[in-house]
Amino acid sequence: MTKKYGGLVALDNLTFKVDQGETVGVIGPNGAGKTTLFDLITGFQHPTSGVVMLDGREITGQSPNQIVQRGMNRTFQTVRPFKDLTVLENVLVGLIQGKGRLTRKGGSAELKDQATELLQLVGLTRAPLSLTRNLSHGELKKLELARALSTFPDVLLVDEVFSGLSAQETQELSDALIRVKASRGLTLLMVEHKVSKVVQMANRMLVLDHGKLLSQGTPQEILSDQKVLEAYLGKG
Amino acid sequence: MARSAAIAVLVVIVIAAVAGVVSYYYVSTAPASTSTSTSTATSTATSTATSTSTQTVTSTGISTVTSTSIKTVTSTGVQPITFGILGPLTDVTGIDEKEGAQLAVTEINAHGGVLGRPLQLVYEDTQEADPTIPVSTGLAAMNRIVTVDHAQVIIGGERSDVVLAEEQQLPKYKVPFLDTGAADTSLGKQVISNYSLYKYFFMVSPVNSTALATGLISYYGYFHYVEPNLTKVYILAEDIAVWHALVPVLQYYLPTLGFTIVSPGGGADYFPYGSTDFTTQMSNVRSTGAQVICILAAGQDSVQLIQTWANLKVPAIPMGIDVAAESPSFWGQTSGAAKYETIEVGIGDTGTPINTIGANFYQNYSKYYNTLPIYTADGAYESVYIAAQAIEKAGTTNGTVLIPYIEKTNLTGPDGVVTFDRSHNVVYNPDYTKGAALSMVQWTAFNTYTPVWPPTVAKPIALPPWM
Amino acid sequence: MVLPEILVFGGLLGAVYALLSLGFSLSYGVARILNLAHGSFYMIGGYVYYVFLTLSGVNGVGSLLLAVALTFLLGIALYLGLIRPVRSAPVRVLLITLSAAIVAQEVVSLAFGDRGVGAPFIIGGISAPLGVVVENQRILAAGVSLAMFLSVWLLIRTTKLGRAVRAVAQDAEAASLMGINDTRISVITLGLSGATAGLAGALLGPLTGISPDAWLNATVVAFAVVILGGLGSIPGTFLAAFLVSYSQIIVAFEVSSSYEIIVPLAVIAVAVLVRPKGLLGKVEE
Amino acid sequence: MPKLPRFLGLGIVLALTLVLLPVVYSNDFALTIMTFANTLAVVAASWDFFTGFTGRFNFGQALFFGVGGYAAGFMNLNLKYGPMLTIPLAGGVAIVVGVAFGYPTLRLKGPYFALATLIFPLIAGDLTFSLSSVFGGEHGLYGLTSISDSYVVQYYGSLILMLATVMVLIYLASSRLGLALESIRDDEKAASATGMNVTKYKLVAYIISAFFTGMAGAYQAQLFKFVGPDTFSSNISFEVIAMTIVGGIATIVGPVLGAYLLVVVLDGLGVSSDISVLTYGVLLMAIVLAFPGGLLGRLKPSLRGMRIRRLVGGKRPGT
């Protein structure tokens, strides 16, 4: 697919597919169009041309909420929590509105269990009733993840989850991701700066540069790819 | 910083609230202030005493005060009778209502009051002069004047929507309401269509809008005889219901008098109530070659209208109904642009009294308040006498009992003879010895307009130099 | 055919609308402040002119300048005293400016009454461009407005200060990193928008009369013009001002005066729905 | 039975005092003023339900107040429906207007929506004059049948309307709906990423707000037996905003107290309009600067507590 803003081309007919259960890392220098790519996939922007398919069905031009209902969700690069709500409520919204649509009949008990489970899953130890605005950056990242998961996605796109985190927080969060993937059998698509992390977690990688797909393959292939080294690490 | 500032602000509010309370108590203790003004008034009244025979209020006609019959209110220890003044008390219309009524109360109390009881006035502010104030404010004031101040008669009213709403409450209060501001025919229609509910309403002044139209048309007839060449009329009216009802009448009669209506569609050019820019209208007037602008304006917008007219030197003379122009301040408001505008007023408001009562009214009014009365003043003045007479005759202040007596009113006042038709509107008659008469006056200088109609009092009309 | 009338009246009115709206556009475009009290500057400007001209010895031009100066200071005061403390929360900015407008209205009507006032013109007399008779004051108002509008525009386009202003408008954070003092820029912006609106009021006030509640219509006009032109776009504001004035005048002449208020508002409402980002607006986020 | 939330506690105390008022202090004027206050409290609470919870600023609540009033007037005069019928039906009409107006405008970004809400009541107000053959111009519609001539009945009527409104709104605010709305207020983009149709929810909140305000307008029309253009006046919209902010935004009960405070202080004392309007302007200013939560801002947590209990059961998880 292609995305143009007026003159400049953000994504230049990019084509790739992700198989179920994969963990795919997307890397590339700033302005390579990584976040734009996520926006296009999750319906926050619509491609100038081209299509987005989710398990065989076209979802191009659908609104974010429709796509969420189809089982794909994302986290935002800069976290967007519901500041004036409690931690608990942040996940409740998704549990109720998302694909799960809980509390129709499931009742409060299930909702409560799901919420507590989610928070444990991402390792958010804060009291569920504490106000979100008081959370640390690391906690917010976890909450962001929990909220994305609360809609029961099959495909999860995580945008720079590790940015601005301490080594220790980074470790916690990546463990959380791995736990999540294991327990939910997610297909994971991650945009990441920290190449090391991606290499560690991904079983396949895409490299973007100036909106073009520069290269793709297993982490090993990518790291040994000359083009990538120039375009990406070269610029450092 | 913001917090401390806000604290300071809160203090201000407290002060404002206090001010509120104070002003409230001021309002509710208004009667006291009246009786003080009474004593002063009495003395002045003495000095201006004209008649020698001791008349009583019960006689038709408003008596003038004689030095022999003065009793001060305070000397009579009996329970006073309370009249309520309900209007925009901070606006010239409301102030004049208040002062006109005070004058009458002073005179009557100087005669020993009614049924041997002194009259006292209470006041509530409806703020209706400000068009952005909702009707509910007026209704709150009305409720207070009846249930808190215990007014047995209500005198006042100005804005027709407020008065209409107030009229709706009368079945609940069962208190006579003497309207001294709104000229709306719908008010009287209510009385006819549902007498038992709305019989409490009376329109004392001005005469209702139909009568105003009749008067205006007869004036135009006279004008055609004085200025046979000025026949092209441009009707410029506020886009409000009272004029919508009146314009067809003009459309029907003016042509029969030899005029041609040049405004769009041979009807009126309606502009939004409260407009502030009249350049388009004035340029239309010019391009249609109109020689007369028939203004129909109840609001303050005419201030701007007349200024634009004068500034652009539009070669057509404005003659019509313009409520704002009836107040002496209009000359100042328009910084003199009002010159040559000719408007319809009650014949008692021309500045030249038509009878001794009017003369007496003018003299005393200008003495106490050193300003000229406007139409609401003589309305309120007459209303007090109307109510006083009815109470005197009925021997009670019970509203329901009073109604038939008020209906039988036949009283000579500054505006002529007041009688009521079955819609409880004051009866219009070109002859002021037979009914409430009208006059056309032309602004000629600061604080002065000269009557140009009816012929009995008429001076020649002046045309603007640019015509 | 009333084409000349429409051309002249629409043009003269549009120029003043442009000046009135300029400040509103600036304060949103630069400082991201939706100032509901913008119309109050217009109203106060009108009153200041009236007070000095009629109640004191100052002559027309002097009163005009005083009106500009005072509304300039008021704009600064409004920002420092009320807007700045709540700057971070747009909703609170809306509320604080609304309350400021209400307070201003009532203070003025306590001082000068609800009925409003009319002030004498700076220049009397009439002339007839294209054979349409108009007051010289109206031509003066339009001329001065145009001049003021252009000079402010030039100020922003060319000067160093202007560059700073535009930098803040682009990206406040980046600008502050570049060492531009955001507060200082906001102060200047609000001062300017106060002064321009005040001038508009002082120029148009004598022609339309000015009353304490005149602020609401002024705010609505400015708001509408700016939205129509595209938030933050000065050329858009200029264009839209004339669109609004002409639609108003055309309706008054060709349809009926009684719709001259409704129709333009309706047109704007529809325009906003059809093209939310306005005529020349960048995409709003 | 968990301890009563501060919220309900206060609510119940308030309700009881209001119910008992005529018994303990049956002063005609006081009752009249309180009747006005109840009507405006309904408007304020419903304004709060939309703006307080969705964060989209509505400057034109008077639109629904006027629409409700005129709708009731029409049905009462032309169809001869009684107040019992016209009041709810007027609410329905307000809903229709709410959809017609909200559906297109609610997609707009903040400032555009604010402008739209500012403009539409002005248009409506002017229309009542331009179409005076229908709306009666300054006459408005008069001669409506009265609710009752008894102050007590009038008062209780308005009280029932007010209490019903508040209870329904609290119920909704403390439900999944309320949660969804608050998430929209905090971050619309993130909200849509939870799978909800943001515009739909905003519209729902908007028409609920319209419905109750419409009924309030209708109640006032039947009370006064008159409805006029003043019901569209921006004064009403602004006054309602002030009441809500003073009482505490997004608390439903806050606006009600705000309404009593302002109406009693202003109308009750018969202060001159300039002073009274000035007072609430300054009050609004002070509250916004110093106490963003409003006087009852502390009710917010307990409303939230209520909601959480309703959603996930009495025993709070993780505590």
Image (cartoon, coloured by chain):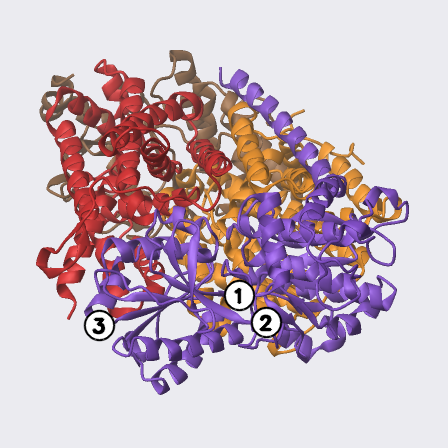
Chain colours: A brown, B purple, C red, D orange
Q: Secondary structure at mark 1?
A: strand
Asked if the residue under mark 2 is in contact with the one under mark 1, i.e. CB atoms within 8 Å, the reply is: yes
Is residue C129 depicted above or below B284 in this figure? above
Where is mark 3, residue-wise? B288
Whether residue B50 sits left or right of residue A93 in the image: it is: right
Chain of the residue on which disc 3 is drawn: B
- x, y percent for residue B178: 68, 63
Looking at numbered disc 1 in the image, what kind of residue is underneath it?
Answer: Gly
Q: Is residue B115 above or below residue D290?
A: below
Please provide percent x and percent y for residue B278: 30, 58
Identify the amino acid type marked 3: Thr
| Residue at position x 34%, y 80% in the image | B225
Q: Residues within 10 Å of mark 2 (few under 14, many from 20)?
A: many
* Numbered disc in front, either 1 or 3: 1
Instruction: Between residue A37 and residue C204, name the one nearer to us.
Output: C204
Locate residue C198, reporting x and y percent: 30, 34
Looking at the rendering, in which quadrant would you find the C terminus of chain C?
top left
Residue A193, given in percent of the width and then of the height, sits at: 26, 22
Viewer-proximal residue among A182 and A141: A141
Q: Which mark is residue B346?
A: 1
CA gap, disc 1 to disc 2? 8 Å
Q: Quadrant of residue A234?
A: top left
Within 10 angstroms of label 3, few (less than 14), some, or many (20 or more) residues? some
Q: CA distance from mark 2 to mark 3?
A: 36 Å
Q: Residue A188 falls in which quadrant of the image?
A: top left
